[in-house]
Amino acid sequence: MRKREYDEDDVRIRPSKGSRPRTRIRPAHEDAVEGFVVAVDRGRYTCLVETAGRKKKRERQLVTAMKARELGRKGIVVGDRVAIVGDVTGQADTLARVVRVEPRTSMLRRSADDTEDTDGIERPIVANADQLVIVTALADPPPRPRMIDRILVAAFDAEIDSLLCLTKSDLAPPAELVALYEPLGVPYVVMQKGGELEELREHLAGRISVLVGHSGVGKSTLVNALVPDANRAVSHVNAVTGRGRHTSSSAVALELPEGGWIIDTPGVRSFGLAHVSVETVLASFPDLVEGTVDCPKGCSHLDEDCALDAWVAAGHADPARLASLRRLLSIREGSPEPE
């Protein structure tokens, strides 16, 4: 397990002279109920909560909540498990308060950019997902391996499983793209318009899966097929640019009929990785880690003096695995794909 990463909760901000004295004593909120954040909209959090109803039966309802002041700058994203107090009936015009964010099992994030100008500002996407589904079309628009590589690196950083979902196979064969990612051992499913969804449902059942992909790949169409009541807006690909238009404006968690959750995210056109270290990417290649012992200090594993070449030449690892590692490291150091 990697060393714990620090976040905004570890930074103490001193109050200004004009603010009232602060106390270390915080309410325990022992009456708080647990909620699951399914949507975020301008400081309002839609949470699914379960409460005791009539005859002690458990009832579930959607509750709108705001962040309590004592949480300070702590961010709340879709997928967070939170503690809520106040009116949790879910009735119209009611507003509860989120008073605590429970420890996260994972956090998928991307940087605003890979350049020094933005200083690699991190943008959290979703919390507590255990699977990242990379949705990419085989044609119309054509696949973008560089984008797929970047999303894979983000999955390695978040320590969550990856799944390639290849759509529009009725327009182009998947063999070439599948071969490119075979050395990485990334599982995949192949989809076509109006095709069966059983194989994909098996991968999603009982898990919290976040769907990521650039615009126009059929992600919203796929969500509507998996969750018929989702009513996610769909778009068409621009015939001139070959790109789709953003139709999902915010992330939303949707419960699957067979159990589990999918989190649909807005289409992305770049995926910065400035927050990801070389060591994080390398850790996803355990068969190559031992070969870095003889590397020079600060080795980027991309230069000629890297010891991994000799390690692979000696038969300790597959050359295709080294090529994949270096492809991901090169993607990490490069700039995001232009729009």
Image (spheres, rainbow, N blue to C red):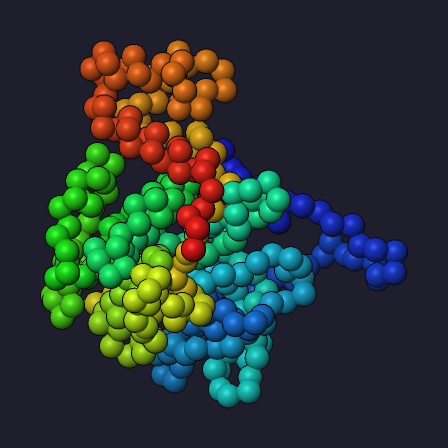
Residue furthest out toward the bottom: 92
Residue at 53% from the left image edge and 61% from the top image edge: 76
**Does residue 55 show up?**
yes
Locate the C terminus by quadrant. Answer: bottom left
Find residue 170 and report its horizontal and vertical position in percent.
12, 62
Q: Quadrant location of the N terminus? A: top left
In the rendered view, tell whether residue 221 sits above or below residue 1.
below
Please tell me which residue lies in front, 233 or 65: 233
Examine the rendering and report whether any part of residue 38 can be seen. no
91 relative to 88, above or below: below
114 left or right, relative to 320: right
Q: Picture coordinates of residue 234 (x, y %)?
A: 31, 73
**Furthest-front residue in view?**
240
Residue drawn 31% across the image and 23% down it: 288
Left or right: 138, with 69 as reference point: left
The residue sitting at 45% across, 68% down in the picture is 250
Residue 42 location in percent, x, y? 57, 72
The answer to which image quadrant residue 330 occupies is top left
Of residues 305 and 277, which is closer to you in this image?
Answer: 305
For image coordinates 74% across by 50% down, the residue present is 13
Give the image quarter of residue 299: top left
Q: Nearer the viewer, residue 18 or 187?
A: 187
Number of callouts: 0
Q: Position of residue 212 (x, y in %)?
A: 35, 57
Locate residue 53 relative to residue 17 in the image: left or right.
left
Residue 308, picture quadrant:
top left
